[in-house]
Amino acid sequence: NAGVMQNPRHLVRRRGQEARLRCSPMKGHSHVYWYRQLPEEGLKFMVYLQKENIIDESGMPKERFSAEFPKEGPSILRIQQVVRGDSAAYFCASSPGSGGRPFTDTQYFGPGTRLTVL
Amino acid sequence: GDSVTQMEGPVTLSEEAFLTINCTYTATGYPSLFWYVQYPGEGLQLLLKATKADDKGSNKGFEATYRKETTSFHLEKGSVQVSDSAVYFCALSEVRSGAGSYQLTFGKGTKLSVIP
């Protein structure tokens, strides 16, 4: 059973370009989360999605960032007009969306995409 | 809002030494608590979790007990190995009112180095 897949693993962009990060959740998982890890920091929540729906985007910057999780295909985190401050590791996690107490749902993380903005 | 505070690193121990990494939290309700481990260049792996007060999570010789009275979830291991060298993150999750979101709130991480 494959784990959470992310690609690319490393992405280099120049200022002003677009960055597109992909995440394929574990088989059978319908919930996807995106987190950002700045150097020497813990992970910060960005957005939580279910198929075709954004459930909570309270951690997403208001401009330039967007996320989607279409009915078919991977979840995409898009960063438009990147700036140097966007350089970070971006992690995707997925969970099955169990029917029990919701906050016991374990999140499984992918290997991350390390974005470098030149 | 929710927050997690864990001891500053880096922590350097000799092989077979006892490990404690302190973690305390602030939450409005009854969160679930987690320890994740990140090996160099990799993503986070769930190490253990506890979902209610007095629960003890354990895995690979690591243990942590959910202490509601002290709002703590300290990580311990009796005898560390070189292969335990990694960054350890304490985290909590709690439903956000209205949104039904289960976002994880992480501490800053504690880097552990175990030397032979």
Image (cartoon, coloured by chain):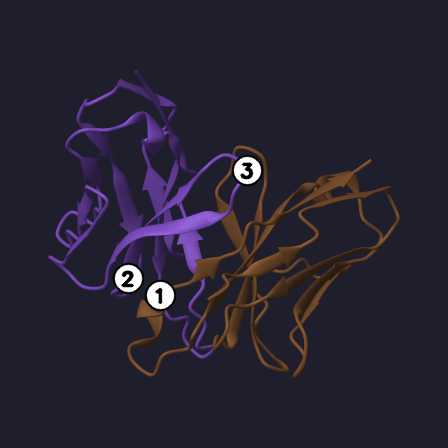
Chain colours: A brown, B purple
Circles 1 and 3, Cβ within 8 Å, touching? The answer is no
Please indicate, yes or no, whether residue A95 appears anywhere in the rendered image: yes
| Residue situated in front as seen by the camera: A103 or B26 | A103
Please indicate, yes or no, whether residue A63 appears anywhere in the rendered image: no
Tag 2 residue: B32
> Considering only vertical position in the picture, is A47 above or below A45?
below
Q: Are marks 1 and 3 on the same chain?
A: yes
Residue B94: image tag: 1
Circles 2 and 1, Cβ within 8 Å, touching? The answer is yes
Circles 3 and 2, Cβ within 8 Å, touching? The answer is no
Residue kind at label 2, given as amino acid type? Ser
Write down the quadrant of residue B96 in the picture. Answer: bottom left
Task: Classify 10 Å Cα crowding around label 2: few (below 14), some (14-19), many (20 and above).
Answer: many
List x then y, in percent, for residue B83: 34, 31
Can you tell which of label 2 and label 1 is closer to the viewer? 2
Residue under the point 63% across and 60% down = A60
Q: Secondary structure at mark 3?
A: loop
Residue kind at label 1, given as amino acid type? Glu
> Considering only vertical position in the picture, is A58 above or below B6?
below
Marked residue nearer the N-terminal end (3 or 2): 2
Task: Classify 10 Å Cα crowding around label 1: few (below 14), some (14-19), many (20 and above).
Answer: many
Q: Secondary structure at mark 2?
A: strand
Tag 3 residue: B41
Q: Secondary structure at mark 1?
A: loop
Give the Cα separation between the discs numbered 1 and 3: 28 Å
Residue kind at label 3, given as amino acid type? Gly
Residue under the point 34% across and 56% down = B92
Q: Chain of mark 3?
A: B
Give the Cα separation between the discs numbered 3 and 2: 27 Å
Can you tell which of label 3 and label 2 is closer to the viewer? 3
